[in-house]
Image (cartoon, grey):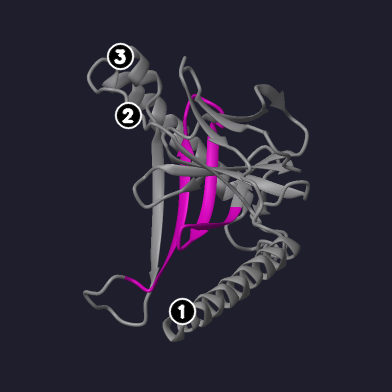
């Protein structure tokens, strides 16, 4: 564990900015965070800007550019944190990681989180209608997991997209994976999460449920219930009249 733990030491730099109107003992109304991490695994470098735990931008080091999390977000201001400054920070992070690795190998245990996955549809599911399955993977540490999909035990690669890693307040990461689906009765979807270098995986299943009764079926059931009620009422009246006749007779 010692050598492996030393090689996998992760250095994370945090810059927290609390957006509050006054200095009080109350928790901040909003939180802006910029997180830089470096590690031996891929991705070897990562830089995310989040607001209230929602990722706004991700810095693409190979392309030296900021990527918005959502297409509707405005572009990153050119004069704010030029790529050259970020590259220097990343180099410092890597140098510090290598230096710490040499010093703590065999002394500190490896820090690793067990991923937790949850699968749910983006829209209310209906058999035969297009939808998107979301696999939300939390408690990721270090940020080096592979997310894949299966349908009835067969790997699925078409219609799959992944997000970058989003840092969380507990110094872990969360990542999302999306799969375009048209669910049918009997389908079994699986989201498989594997940590780099692990022999075990976390698997979460999603099975489409039968749709709710249609309006026609609901109308038919209501009509049948009403007819049954009328029949029982007539039967009750007939029994009352028969009882009265027997009493007079």
Q: Is residue 127 above or below residue 55?
A: above
The residue drawn where x is 57% and y is 32% is: 43
Return the x and y of residue 25 as percentages of the image width and height. Answer: 21, 74
- Provide the residue designation for mark 2: 111
Q: Are marks 2 and 3 in contact (CB under 8 Å)?
A: no
Cα gap from disc 1 to disc 3, whole angstroms: 94 Å
The answer to whether residue 48 is magenta is yes
Dot 3: what SS?
loop
| Distance between mark 2 and mark 3 Cα atoms | 10 Å
Q: Please identify the quarter of the rendering in which residue 157 is found.
A: top right
- In the picture provided, is 220 more to the left or to the right than 247? right
Q: Which residue is mark 1?
A: 246
**Residue nearer the viewer, 67 or 205:** 205
Above or below, comparing residue 111 to residue 116 in the picture:
above
Q: Is residue 222 magenta?
A: no
Secondary element type, mark 1: helix
Which circle, 2 or 1, is nearer the viewer? 1
Q: Helix, strand, or loop for circle 2?
A: loop
Q: Are marks 1 and 3 in contact (CB under 8 Å)?
A: no
State the residue at coordinates (27%, 78%). Answer: 23
Picture quadrant of residue 184: top right
**Which residue is label 3 attached to?**
1
Q: Going from the N terminus, do you reach mark 1 or mark 3 first?
A: 3
Magenta stretch: give its range. 28-57
| Mark 2 vs mark 1, CA separation in Å | 89 Å
Depth check: give the residue in front, 224 or 59. Answer: 224
């Amino acid at each position: 564990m010692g050598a492996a733990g030393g090689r996998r030491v992760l250095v994370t730099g945090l810059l927290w900015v609390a957006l509050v109107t006054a200095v009080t003992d109350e928790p901040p109304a909003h939180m802006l965070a910029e997180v830089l991490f470096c590690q031996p695994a891929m991705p070897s470098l990562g830089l995310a800007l989040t607001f209230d735990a929602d990722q706004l931008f991700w810095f693409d080091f190979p392309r030296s550019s900021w990527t918005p999390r959502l297409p509707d977000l405005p572009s990153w201001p050119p004069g704010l944190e030029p790529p050259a400054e970020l590259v220097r920070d990343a180099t410092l992070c890597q140098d510090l990681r290598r230096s710490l690795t040499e010093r703590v190998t065999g002394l500190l245990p490896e820090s690793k989180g067990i991923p937790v996955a949850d699968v749910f549809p983006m829209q209310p599911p209906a058999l035969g209608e297009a939808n998107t399955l979301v696999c939300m993977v939390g408690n990721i540490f270090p940020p080096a997991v592979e997310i894949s999909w299966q349908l009835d035990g067969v790997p699925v690669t078409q219609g799959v997209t992944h997000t970058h890693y989003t840092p969380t307040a507990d110094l872990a990461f969360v990542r999302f994976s999306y799969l375009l689906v048209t669910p049918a009765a009997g389908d079994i979807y699986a989201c498989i999460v594997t940590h780099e270098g692990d022999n075990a995986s976390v698997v979460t299943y999603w099975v489409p449920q039968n749709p709710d009764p249609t309006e026609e079926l609901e109308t038919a059931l209501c009509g049948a219930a009403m007819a049954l009620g009328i029949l029982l009422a007539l039967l009750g009246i007939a029994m009352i009249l028969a009882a009265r006749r027997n009493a007079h007779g």
